[in-house]
Structures are given as structure tokens and as C-alpha cells.
Image: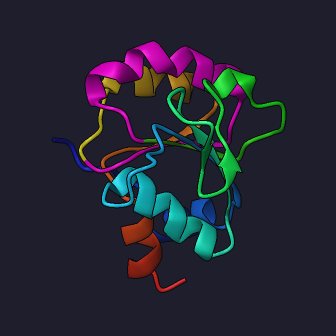
């Protein structure tokens, strides 16, 4: 898999943004899609879960899709398989976040290019928790 080209300074700038929607957030505490957003909440981020199979996760109301969230979002953090990104990307672009962050193991070049052409920063194949800890925020 390709490596994400963002510098530490760029990642720090992205991590300074605080409003995050998490597509694929899990209600199962053993999954990264649960403990990564929990870590972000515990570190001062405002996290909104997007999961059509849950009403609430970590006492926060879930949305069925990113398009249902009324408020502005800085980062859309995606925990879905690479092959599902193309079906999600248009709704993500419509939401107009500053950043779309595809977690470790997730990469879809064509979808990422669509987002970049819409003026959205795309981070791929990186974990927000790992980057936050690595950069000692």
C-alpha cells in the first residue's frame, strides 16, 4: 500500500481541528473503530458517530449517514474497507470537511483524487490515535 505523504507539521495542523465525524464507528470496545474515537473524545475532540446499526455509541447519538449531520465537520474519519470508499466519497465531499482521514489499511486512489479536486485534504493509511500519540499532543 502507498504511504501517505503528509509531513509531521501537516499532520499536527490537521490534528488541531476538533470536530470529527467517524464513519463506521463501532459499539464494540475491542475494535479500533471504537477505541480510536474514544481516545479522541478523551483528548478533547468533539466526535460524532456515523453508524446505521446503533442509536448511541459512548453516549453520543449516532447518525445513519454523514449527510444527516447538520453541523459543520472539520474531519471525516473513515473506518470502512477500501472497497466501500467509492460509495461513501460523494456524501463526504458534499459535507465539505477540511479533511477526510482514511484509517490504517484504507486507500482508494480514485476516491481520494475526487476529494482533493474538491479542495479537501486527504490522509490515508494512518491512524489518528497513533499519529496523535507519536506527535505527543
Residue 4: image location, x then y, percent: 32, 50
- Say left or right for 50 vs 7: right
Quadrant of the rendered structure where residue 102 is? top left
Residue 60: image location, x then y, percent: 68, 51
Quadrant of the rendered structure where residue 54 is? top right
Q: Is residue 8 above or below residue 81?
A: below
Q: How is the image coloured?
A: rainbow
- Residue at point 71%, 27% (across, down): 95
| Residue 21 part of the magenta-drawn span | no
Q: Quadrant of the C terminus?
A: bottom right
Q: Spot the residue most to the left.
A: 1
Number of marks: 0
Q: Is residue 41 above or below residue 107?
A: below
Q: Is residue 81 above or below residue 102?
A: above
- Residue at point 37%, 59% (across, down): 127
| Residue 84 part of the magenta-drawn span | yes
- Residue at point 29%, 34% (across, down): 107
Residue 3: image location, x then y, percent: 24, 49
Q: Quadrant of the N terminus?
A: top left
Return the residue nearer the eye: 128 or 12: 128
Instruction: Give the residues in magenta.
Output: 79-104
Return the residue nearer the eye: 12 or 46: 46
Return the residue nearer the eye: 80 or 56: 56
Amino acid at each position: 500500500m502507498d504511504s501517505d505523504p503528509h509531513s509531521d507539521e501537516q499532520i499536527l495542523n490537521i490534528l488541531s481541528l476538533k470536530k470529527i465525524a467517524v464513519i463506521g464507528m463501532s459499539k464494540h470496545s475491542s475494535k479500533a473503530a471504537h477505541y480510536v474515537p474514544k481516545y479522541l473524545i478523551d483528548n478533547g475532540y468533539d466526535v460524532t458517530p456515523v453508524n446505521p446499526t446503533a442509536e448511541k455509541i459512548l453516549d453520543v447519538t449516532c447518525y445513519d449517514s454523514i449527510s444527516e449531520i447538520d453541523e459543520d465537520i472539520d474531519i471525516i474519519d473513515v473506518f470502512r474497507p477500501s472497497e466501500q470508499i467509492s460509495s461513501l466519497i460523494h456524501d463526504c465531499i458534499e459535507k465539505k470537511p477540511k479533511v477526510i482521514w482514511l484509517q490504517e489499511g484504507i486507500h482508494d486512489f480514485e476516491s481520494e483524487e475526487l476529494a482533493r479536486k474538491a479542495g479537501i485534504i486527504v490522509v490515508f493509511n494512518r491512524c489518528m490515535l497513533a499519529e496523535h500519540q507519536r506527535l505527543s499532543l
